[in-house]
């Protein structure tokens, strides 16, 4: 297979060849993608055991990905992780323009990112996501590291327009106690952007064991988490020229989902918002708007 420039990272190579893999190789690809940020801690034998495949399948898999073997694959994973850290990016970013020019370029890039993403976003997936949120008895929200801000925003907005929106980020080790009340009528809204936490797959596996369905918001074209989700909404976040990735598309989509949910559930949302405002008045916790 001829690798594209976009598939220069080990993870991207696995995604590009995913559709051509055998069933056994796909199981190994799922493990590699799900545990991408922890790959340096595994041997090829351990990955094969996790995937339920043979060592010969693992050897064939890494050769198909363009590596001489697992050792070369792991070396490139280590090098790619180093290049993707903000520390490494800081050394690469060079600013010669004025501050005003830099700001204009940054805002223009975000605006272009929104335009490009809007053209690629599947309306059917957005509709399916809204249907899941509307039917759910409870909505559980989770996202770690760089995904936490988007997850927090989702929980804050959805909690205004519907009841029983629960953040798993605040569990403080109490995920088992919280998820004990989850059921197959619930939805887990999971946010998964790079650099990915190894904790998310474990928490989602626990949630799915209760029967809860997964609504995944991610920047990954293909991932093991996406294969386990009922609905996947993709928002590219990578910014090769900046120190940090941009989440403008994800924040915009969350805003749209909450606002559209409110208009489709107008009576229930109006009653909830009215009750919230009444309680703010009792609490006297907001400054008056001018």
Image: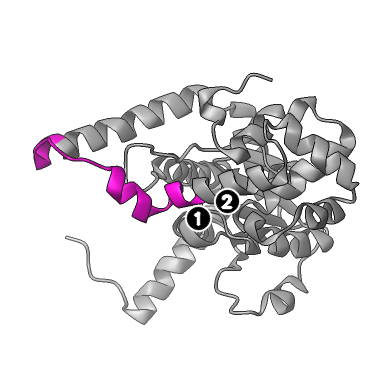
Numbered badge on residue 192: 2
Could you tell me if residue 135 is visible in this image?
no
Image position, residue 193 (x, y; %): 53, 49
- Pointer 1 local density, CA inside 10 Å: few below 14, some 14–19, many at least 20: many
Residue picked out by circle 1? 147
Which of the pair 220/215 is nearer the observer? 220
| Residue occupying image coordinates x 73% and y 76% | 176
| Numbered disc 2: secondary structure | strand
Q: CA distance from mark 1 to mark 2?
A: 6 Å
Which of the pair 74/123 is nearer the observer? 74
Quarter of the image holding residue 166?
bottom right
Image position, residue 97 (x, y; %): 12, 35
> Please, is residue 22 above or below residue 273 in the view?
above
Q: Are marks 1 and 2 in contact (CB under 8 Å)?
A: yes
- Pointer 2 local density, CA inside 10 Å: few below 14, some 14–19, many at least 20: many
Reply yes or no: does residue 93 show up in magenta. yes
Q: Is residue 151 left or right of residue 49?
A: left
Which of the pair 158/5 is nearer the observer? 5
């Amino acid at each position: 297979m001829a690798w594209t420039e976009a598939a220069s990272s080990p993870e991207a190579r696995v995604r590009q060849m995913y559709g051509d893999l055998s069933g056994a190789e796909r199981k190994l690809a799922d493990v590699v993608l799900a545990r991408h940020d922890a790959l340096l801690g595994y041997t090829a034998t351990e990955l094969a055991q996790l995937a339920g495949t043979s060592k010969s399948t693992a050897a064939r898999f890494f050769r198909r990905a363009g590596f001489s073997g697992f050792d070369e694959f792991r070396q490139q994973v280590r090098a790619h992780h180093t290049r993707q850290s903000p520390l490494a990016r800081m050394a690469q970013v060079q600013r010669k323009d004025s501050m005003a020019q830099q700001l204009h370029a940054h805002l223009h890039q975000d605006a272009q990112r929104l335009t490009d993403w809007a053209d690629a976003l599947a309306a059917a997936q957005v509709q399916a996501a809204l249907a899941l949120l509307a039917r759910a008895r409870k909505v559980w929200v989770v996202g770690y590291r760089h995904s936490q801000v988007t997850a927090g925003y989702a929980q804050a907005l959805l909690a205004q327009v519907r009841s029983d929106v629960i953040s798993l980020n605040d569990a403080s080790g109490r995920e088992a106690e919280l998820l004990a009340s989850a059921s197959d009528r619930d939805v887990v809204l999971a946010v998964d952007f790079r650099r990915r936490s190894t904790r998310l797959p474990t928490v989602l596996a626990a949630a799915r064991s209760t029967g809860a369905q997964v609504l995944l918001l991610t920047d990954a074209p293909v991932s093991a988490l996406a294969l386990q989700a009922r609905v996947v909404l993709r928002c590219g976040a990578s910014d090769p020229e900046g120190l940090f990735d941009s989440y403008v598309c994800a924040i915009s989509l969350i805003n749209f989902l909450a606002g559209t949910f409110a208009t489709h559930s107008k009576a229930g949302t109006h009653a909830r918002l009215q009750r919230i405002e009444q309680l703010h008045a009792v609490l006297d916790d907001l400054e008056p708007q001018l």
